[in-house]
Image (cartoon, grey):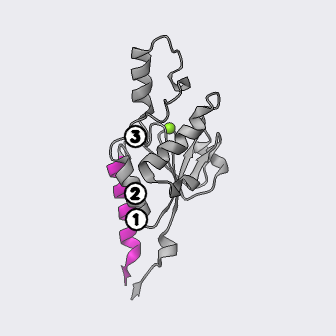
Amino acid sequence: MVYQINESDRSKIIHIDMDDTICNYSALYQHDLQFYPECQYPQSREGFFLELEPIANAINSVKHLQSLGHKIYFLTAPSYKNAHCYSEKRLWIEKFFGLEICKNLIIAENKSLVIGDYLIDDHTEGRGQNNFIGKLIHFGSEQFPNWIEITNFFNALECPTLNIIK
Ligand SMILES: [Mg+2]
């Protein structure tokens, strides 16, 4: 007997953190500290969040997860003292993923308030990650050191449920 799972059953809600998960926050932070030592808080510089480089393979991997039918949301905590952070995060998403998905940008200090199947984040606590209802995928951990492994994880989810032969 062959069981087939339809598209809606396979589709998951995946929340993806931004800083140091898809955007290389630390690299620009360290760069600014070195080259603009007079600026104690690099993230307070206008343009900082827009200039972040993508993490290796993040853009293509996220697009791949979209192509598998998953619902992608960007769930990021704000640098709340820097008002430009809010609009620059939105512009960054548009720059790499297009306008449409900007509807799925969620800026929240407490990520446990948001419902979903998965949260991909470089931190396991501090912004409610430890109370997130769903599976936390710890980006940068031994199990998920990079976006290749995260992509492999979601690809593997596809296979066993597609055709269960008894
Ligand atoms: Mg982060």
Q: Describe residue 67's horizontal placement relative to residue 129 as left or right.
A: left
Q: Do the residues labelled 2 and 1 touch (CB within 8 Å)?
A: yes
Q: Of the residues under marks 3 and 1, which one precedes in the sequence?
A: 1
Q: How far apart are marks 3 and 1 (CA)?
A: 23 Å
Q: Describe residue 3's horizontal placement relative to residue 71 as left or right.
A: left
Q: Of the residues under marks 2 and 3, which one precedes in the sequence?
A: 2
* Along the line of sight, the residue nearer the viewer: 24 or 83: 83
Q: Is residue 149 magenta?
A: yes
Work out which residue is located at the far right of the displayed protein and give it: 113
- Tell which tag, 2 or 3, sits nearer the viewer: 2
Residue that numbered label 2 is attached to: 63
Q: Distance between the residues labelled 2 and 1?
A: 6 Å
- State the extent of the magenta-drawn residues as a range: 147-166
**Kind of residue sitting beneath label 3:** Gly
Question: How far across and how far down the image is residue 98, in percent?
Answer: 46, 54
**Kind of residue sitting beneath label 1:** Ser
Asked which secondary structure carries label 1, the reply is helix
Asked which secondary structure carries label 3, the reply is loop
- Tell which tag, 3 or 1, sits nearer the viewer: 1
Q: Residue at x 53, y 24 (%)?
A: 45
Give the answer, above or below, for where 28 lies relative to 124: above
Q: Describe residue 14's horizontal placement relative to residue 166 as left or right.
A: right
Residue that numbered label 3 is attached to: 140
Give the answer, above or below, for where 132 lies relative to 30: below
Q: In which quarter of the image is residue 155?
A: bottom left
Residue that numbered label 1 is attached to: 67
